[in-house]
Image (tube, grey):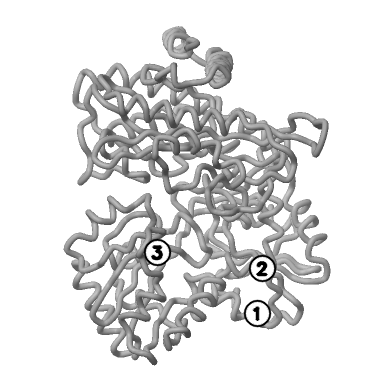
């Protein structure tokens, strides 16, 4: 079916149900970032394949909201679909409720699926719609009937993340959670929290080793709600030894309704269907999320090992790319495949941590550009190639961006490369007192480019999980212009990734994953913290306008390059070691 045919089928169902508008988000029942195929309804109805966006269909109009990462991509993919692109956070763009209020008569009914919308989203939308005389239904999933070839619920086999990687047993984590909730219960819907709590992993979600399930902990019991086909005898024995009982995935709402004690629930991460089943909900920030963001020593050592392996793969790929692009025949997709091959050679590799962003030339200006057979272009020995990628290893998750000079560059490209580098260095070298949050440090990454009238609209950094999601606890510690009050504390991992994007020309981004570590007690208002650079990969120096760097920035950069060589050289053969020595020479 064409997009226009799918939309018309939805409208026919809406007329039958007495609905004037239906809203389709990009999420699943677990409010996940990476959504299993079964719940990619927004992509199915609109044809837009970006990871973030919301489609809204009325009886005679349709629109799609997405953020700045996808403006270019969405414009291309929505052409001819009947969907109007709504650019989020751009002046003049209405909210979904505002738009519906302007196109629907008062008394109209708007609908969402309670299973794929969080409690906070439903409540907020309902309040906004009331202001326009509109009401909200939450009891319908049109895609259950319209999407005839809809994929099934994922059924990959669960497996245990051993103590040699996790560093703490599930029973110990459960004991700590119970200390936080007292005589209450807690429902855990977030897949990263389920995975962390039980030291359990699977391949239910693309790029992230999550097991699809819910966990309910009471003072006396802990139950995992999961499709039984996913549980091997070994995993069943492990869970029993850790005190965890098993229930079917679909039993969650009935069991929650039967609980007659207060239940801790996080409205921002729990779907409205789950929330509505609880008799005595207690709205709380997630105690589990607040625990998992702090990496223990075993996890930290695992991160360091994973970064060494990933650095080896990146060095091999960078050298191979610079040698083979001039020979011809390379495209964005072929280079993506080659990088995955180099990562797959590394011990404990379990796949990539997200679809590689391999943007050559003007594609580099599309912040989250994923090359497809339809968009793939040849990569030539000129201009810039932006590669944002990562790997999943049993001992750690990686996320790294490098911008590769492939040949002659314009002065503007060199300037942008250097401005991004300055911001990357300033943030990466920061020292800050206890209580500082990422929003307070975000300016460090942007200040140099602001002076040239340049900015970027995405965040500058996010948490990274330990063999979990590459975007961890995305509502907590971050670098971004928008206020995020969570203080940065030792044990947290976070990325540093400023960028510049010139539409139709090029994109530049540099990114490392970092660990917050102690710096010094300080004279006043201590202690003070700094960042340990976990990522180990050279930054190519040809485009750098050295005169734009301060002496302090040059020193920090040269020290980083030296560290990269010293850590990776023992893991490389002679040929790659010599190449790495050359590209990490001081500037």
- Quadrant position of the N terminus in the picture: bottom left
- Residue at 51%, 42% (x, y): give it: 460
Please, which residue is most extreme toward the left here? 80
Disc 3 is placed on an element classified as: helix
Numbered-mark total: 3
- Residue at 59%, 52% (x, y): give it: 473
Q: Is residue 507 visible?
A: yes
The residues tagged by marks 3 and 2 sit, at their Cα atoms, a distance apart of 23 Å
Give the answer, above or below, for where 107 lies relative to 27. Answer: below
Decide if residue 276 is on the left or right side of residue 168.
Answer: left
Image quadrant assignment for residue 62: bottom left
According to the picture, the residue beneath numbered tag 2 turns out to be 187
Which x, y percent locates residue 425? 54, 28
Which x, y percent locates residue 419? 43, 30
Q: Look at the numbered discs 2 and 1 and tell me whether their residues touch, using CB distance below 8 Å.
A: yes
Task: Tell me which label, 2 or 1, sits earlier in the chain.
Answer: 2
The numbered mark at residue 226 is none
According to the picture, the residue beneath numbered tag 3 turns out to be 38
Disc 1 is placed on an element classified as: loop
Q: Which mark is in front, 1 or 3?
A: 1
Task: Tell me which label, 3 or 2, sits earlier in the chain.
Answer: 3
According to the picture, the residue beneath numbered tag 1 turns out to be 278
Decide if residue 186 is on the left or right side of residue 83.
Answer: right
């Amino acid at each position: 079916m064409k997009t226009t045919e799918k939309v018309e089928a939805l409208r026919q169902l809406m007329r039958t149900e007495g609905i004037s508008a239906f809203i389709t988000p990009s999420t699943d029942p677990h409010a996940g970032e990476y959504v299993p195929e079964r719940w990619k309804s927004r992509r199915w109805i609109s044809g837009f394949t970006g990871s973030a966006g919301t489609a809204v269909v009325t009886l005679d109009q349709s629109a799609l909201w997405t953020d700045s990462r996808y403006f270019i991509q969405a414009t291309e993919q929505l052409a001819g679909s009947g969907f109007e692109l709504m650019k989020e956070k751009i002046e003049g763009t209405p909210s979904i409720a505002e738009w519906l209020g302007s196109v629907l008569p008062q008394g109209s009914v708007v609908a969402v699926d309670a299973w794929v919308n969080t409690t906070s989203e439903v409540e907020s939308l309902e309040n906004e719609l009331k202001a326009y005389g509109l009401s909200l239904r939450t009891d319908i999933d049109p895609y259950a009937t319209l999407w005839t070839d809809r994929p099934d619920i994922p059924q990959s086999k669960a497996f245990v993340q051993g103590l040699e990687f996790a560093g703490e047993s599930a029973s110990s984590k459960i004991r700590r959670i119970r200390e936080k909730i007292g005589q209450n219960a807690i429902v855990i819907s977030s897949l990263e929290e389920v995975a962390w709590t039980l030291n359990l992993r699977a391949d239910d979600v693309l790029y992230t080793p999550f097991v699809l399930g819910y966990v309910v902990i009471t003072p006396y019991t802990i139950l995992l709600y999961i499709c039984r086909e996913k549980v091997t005898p070994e995993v069943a024995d492990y869970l029993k030894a850790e005190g965890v009982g098993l229930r079917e995935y679909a039993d969650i709402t009935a069991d929650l309704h039967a609980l007659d004690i207060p239940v801790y629930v996080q409205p921002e991460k729990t779907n409205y269907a789950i929330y509505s089943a609880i008799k005595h909900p207690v709205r709380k920030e997630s105690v589990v999320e607040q625990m998992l963001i702090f990496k223990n020593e075993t996890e930290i050592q695992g991160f360091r090992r994973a970064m060494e392996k990933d650095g080896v793969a990146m060095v091999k790929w960078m050298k191979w790319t610079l040698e083979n692009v001039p020979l011809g025949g390379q495209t964005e997709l072929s280079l993506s495949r080659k990088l995955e091959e180099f990562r797959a050679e590394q011990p404990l590799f379990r796949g990539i941590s997200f679809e590689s962003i391999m943007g050559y030339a003007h594609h580099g200006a599309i912040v989250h550009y994923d090359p497809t057979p339809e968009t793939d272009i040849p990569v030539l020995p000129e201009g810039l190639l932006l590669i944002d990628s990562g790997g999943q290893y049993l001992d750690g998750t990686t996320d790294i961006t490098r911008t590769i000079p492939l040949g002659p560059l314009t002065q503007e490209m060199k300037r942008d490369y250097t401005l991004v580098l300055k911001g990357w260095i300033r943030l990466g070298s920061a020292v800050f007192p206890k209580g500082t949050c990422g929003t307070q440090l975000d300016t460090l990454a942007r200040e140099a480019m602001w002076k040239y009238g340049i900015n970027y609209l995405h965040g500058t950094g996010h948490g990274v999980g330990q063999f979990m999601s590459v975007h961890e606890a995305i509502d907590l510690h971050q670098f971004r212009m928008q206020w995020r009050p969570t203080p940065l504390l030792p044990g947290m991992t976070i990325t540093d990734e400023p960028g510049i994007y010139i539409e139709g020309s090029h994109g530049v981004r540099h990114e490392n994953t970092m660990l917050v570590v102690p710096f010094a007690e300080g004279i006043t208002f201590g202690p003070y913290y700094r960042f340990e650079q976990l990522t180990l990969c050279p930054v190519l120096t040809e485009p750098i306008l050295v005169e734009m760097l301060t002496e302090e920035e040059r020193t920090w950069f040269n020290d980083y390059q030296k560290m990269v060589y010293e850590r990776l050289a023992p893991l490389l053969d002679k040929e790659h070691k010599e190449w790495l020595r050359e590209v990490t020479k001081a500037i």
